[in-house]
Image (cartoon, rainbow, N blue to C red):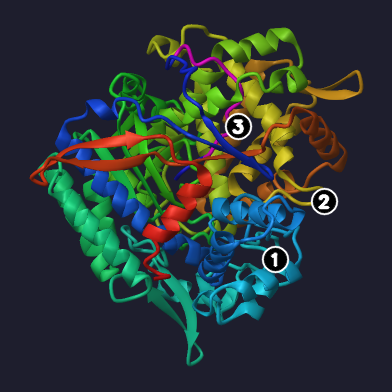
Amino acid sequence: MATGLLIAAASTSTIMAADNDFNYVVDRFADIEVLRYKVPDFENLPLNQKLLIYHLNEAALAGRDILWDQNNKYNLALRTMLENVYRNFSGDKNSKEFKAFEKYLKQVWFANGIHHHYSMDKFTPEFSETFLREQVAKLPKDKQPANTDTLMSVIFDPAFMPKKVNQAEGQDLILTSATNIYEGVTQPEVEAYYAAMKDTTDLTPISYGLNTRKVKVNGKVVEQPYKIGGLYSDAISRIVNELKEASQYAENPAQKAYMDKLIEFYTTGDLKTFDEYSILWADETNARVDFINGFIESYDDPLGMTGSWESIVNFKNNEASSRTEKLSANAQWFEDHSPINPAFRKDKVKGVSAKVITAAILAGDSYPATPIGINLPNANWIRASHGSKSVTLENITQAYDEASHGNGFNEEFVIDAETGKLLDDYLFITDNLHTDLHECLGHGSGKILPGVDPDALKAHGSTLEEARADLFALYYLADPKLIELGLLDNPDAYKAEYYKYILNGLMTQLMRIEPGKDVEEAHMRNRKLISEWAYEHGKDANVIEYVKNNGKTYIRINDYPALRKLFGELLGEIQRIKSEGDYEAGRDLVEKYAVKVDPAIHKEVLDRYAHLNIAPYKGFVNPVYSLVKDSNGNITDVTISYEEGYVPQMLRYSSDYSPLTD
């Protein structure tokens, strides 16, 4: 599964040289900062690899509309209306109303729709409905939407579709969520539909519901598949055409085979074919260029089944991959020494491959906000039988790091200069190692007992799975094995990540939550669960301590080895919950430790962050790739440019990659 981790200020000297001439920051609005990322060494790739990347990039961008429509059924029409107003506006662009309108449009672009990408709450416009109606009325008739009144309700009525994904315990999560992957069905109906379909004795189950919209027809739940000839056919056809172009430049027969199998899946919508593709993809580890493209992560499904469309195209960072290769080569050792019940360990870890990659393009659910690590396939039986691929997107983490320099975070929230120096010296490398361990080994560790439904943890499955992988990574960051492997040079280096993680989980990630709101996003819940559980269970020994200094609250970790032991204990329990499918125990952990926010701490964090002017969320614009041809029309090169801004990129993507709105 993908994971997104908050990167604090740290030195990059251990991984990459800083680039002081590259302008990472592109735009800033609301709670968002938009950055650029570099694609080191692209210019040095051979032409065939450049062309492979080029066509894979085109396939990635071709699926943009799919995610927008998955997120909400009004998103595409609303985006078109807003962009038409923006392009045709002829009034005062410095007016308060227009500035508020522009801010709203930028927020909608960033979130791929009308709901915040993290909080899931609908954006609140700061311009008037009268202003927007006047602007729409000025548009040419063929640019005016047929459903203007409905779109106005979508934007301005706070009670209409207020939450993209609702995770509140005790509510019908489908009826109270605004995603477009269900229509006219209830949570009990969908759960009963899949319960009747699943065979608990099947050792190779398909990923039920991964690529379908669930609707009711003649009183029965029906799945509408995403495929050529089905939903999103025009976009998927364009993706497939670009995949066919890309396959001509495949680096080896195995890579071409999995590309052809993905094309077959898009053509048929058959999830058995998707599993066959996933196996071929996981088995191919020799090509330098790689990609994901499809319906993958299910965080935006309130029941955790349907995959949001996404794509990332990348190529291997050969030098930095030495550390992930050391981890994957020792995967069995880590599994054998995991602090979990031996009955839940894998007897033989298969096919774990890990590398550090350079992202070439981000798309769909990975754009503009993106994970910094990925471990796929998600199917547990494929992981167990065939292994998985794990990647760390190091050019993305470098961009985060470079943009954070001098932002004042450490001075405001870190308890003392000694801890601040520890973060400066070791946080970047331990953050990257945490991602490596989380993705490479954490998600692929452990096993589900025979007969246990992989979806048994239901709405809490994503939170608990991310917690399991994080705990695995945290536990092993402090292990002498990392010193032995040459991945760290100081036995105390892990303390930098431990401190940042607990500080983030208990306090600083609350900057992303509005006053009075619960924590809802799966990764944030995961970090809060771990940190709050460790604080409570280490309270008698004062392992973690809240400290007041000059009226401000700080976190002090008094016993790092004891904290590691606590991480191991919680890992053991969450692995048991997953292995046995213990829904009640998993629900209780999440509801007790991961959801509710202390209002006093929350207010203090928000007040202190306000003085720093740090954007809680960051995302990216993509570089632009162009074909170079000679006088005879032959392609001689593919060039890369970093000049495009946020607004021009969004408008260009809507013009050039909108097959569902053409």
The magenta span reads: 4-14
Marks 2, 3: nearer the viewer: 2
What's the amino acid at mark 2? Gly
Q: Position of residue 336 (x, y in %)?
A: 40, 28
> Splitting the image into 4 quarters, where does residue 536 fall?
top right
54 to the left or right of 657? left
Mark 1 / mark 2, whichever is N-terminal:
1
Quarter that holds the N terminus: top left
Q: Is residue 165 above or below residue 438?
A: below
Q: Position of residue 246 (x, y in %)?
A: 19, 49
What's the amino acid at mark 1? Pro
**Cα distance between the residues tagged 2 and 3:** 32 Å
Residue picked out by circle 2: 516
Q: Residue at x 28, y 37 (%)?
A: 350
Local crowd at mark 1 within 10 Å, few (<14), some, or many (≥20)? Answer: many
Marks 1, 2: nearer the viewer: 1
Q: Nearer the viewer, residue 41 or 140?
A: 140
Q: Considering the whole magenta stretch, tell me its main secondary structure.
A: loop
Q: Residue at x 80, y 37 (%)?
A: 606
